[in-house]
Image (cartoon, rainbow, N blue to C red):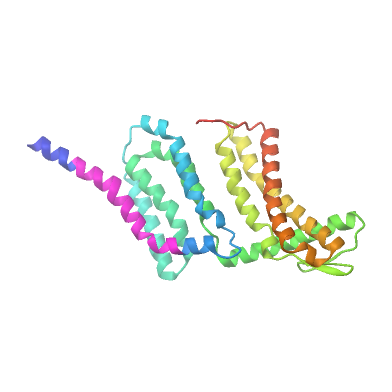
Amino acid sequence: MELSRIKSYKKLKEIFMKVIIPTLFFVIFYPTYSHLFGRFSARDSYYSHGYIVPFVCLYFVWQKRKRLKEIDFKSEIIGIFVLSAGLLLHLASLSLRINFGSYFAIPISIFGIVLYLYGRKALKEVIFPIVFLVFMLPLPKVVIIAISFKMKLLAAQGAIFIAESLSMKAQRVGSIIYYPGGQLLVGDPCSGLRSLISFLALGAVFTQLTGAKLWRKIILFFITIPIALLSNLSRIFFLFIVSYIYGEKAAQGVVHDFSGFMVFVLGFLLLILASKLLKCSLVRDN
């Protein structure tokens, strides 16, 4: 009889750990999801890739399925404290209407849940998918505006430098490039911040798909920064050339949209080239 009670207790505890806790997590963070989705779907969003991030995380967890099956799960009580910290951050952020704090509380809370339910060995295997969630968490709008402003000035100045090197007359005033007979405005969508965020996420994915040494992976990840900047600069200069030769209107509409697509194609090719140079060969299974 006593043995039956113990088994029932363990079964109830297991249900609580594996069903109730994750369910409560989704319910508690429900108010945050609408804010996140709003940022993902906003016009000229810098985080339109946010919808894809959770699926990428699930893929990397699935990729670890064989290792996870071999692990003897052991609950870590410290996970409760980590989870509590994440929930407190979330609740405080909600009351103060600081959305970014609530966003950041999501991976912290998941970190705590995994640590409490499955232990350190399991957490070690899925640490990357949890950390990768950061790439779907939008920065505060004030921070985005400040960074975007600096980056579009940098992009405009870079285009001016190339133009002058080719003996083309051009002058920058703020983020506007003036040339004989017209001007080209480097707006926020052309600042390169969107491509920088996307390429950092893509670079992180690349590091997990390669079997290279850690230092090579780190270099590959950080090299996505100059790749993103260079790709965006090529877009600005391309639009400048089109505008310079054919007029302002020619650099708008389809040409402008095509140049945005060109940024990602060029950046992706450069990232592949960088991985080849660093000898970061892709692997099929971890």
Inspect this view and state whether residue 76 appears. Answer: no
Seen from the viewer's position, the closer of residues 265 and 172 is: 265
Magenta part of the chain: 10-34
In the depicted structure, whether residue 114 falls above or below residue 216? below
Quarter location, residue 182: bottom right
**Total numbered labels placed on residues in the image:** 0
Seen from the viewer's position, the closer of residues 245 and 119 is: 245
Could you tell me which residue is drawn at 67 percent across and 49 percent down? 264
Residue located farthest toward the right when viewing the structure as drawn? 167
Could you tell me which residue is drawn at 66 percent across and 31 percent down? 279
Inspect this view and state whether residue 164 appears. Answer: yes
Seen from the viewer's position, the closer of residues 144 and 273 is: 273
Please, what is the dominant secondary structure of the magenta stretch?
A: helix
Q: Is residue 173 magenta?
A: no
Residue 16, image x and y in percent?
Answer: 25, 48
In the displayed structure, does residue 16 sit left or right of residue 261?
left
In the displayed structure, does residue 20 sit left or right of residue 99?
left
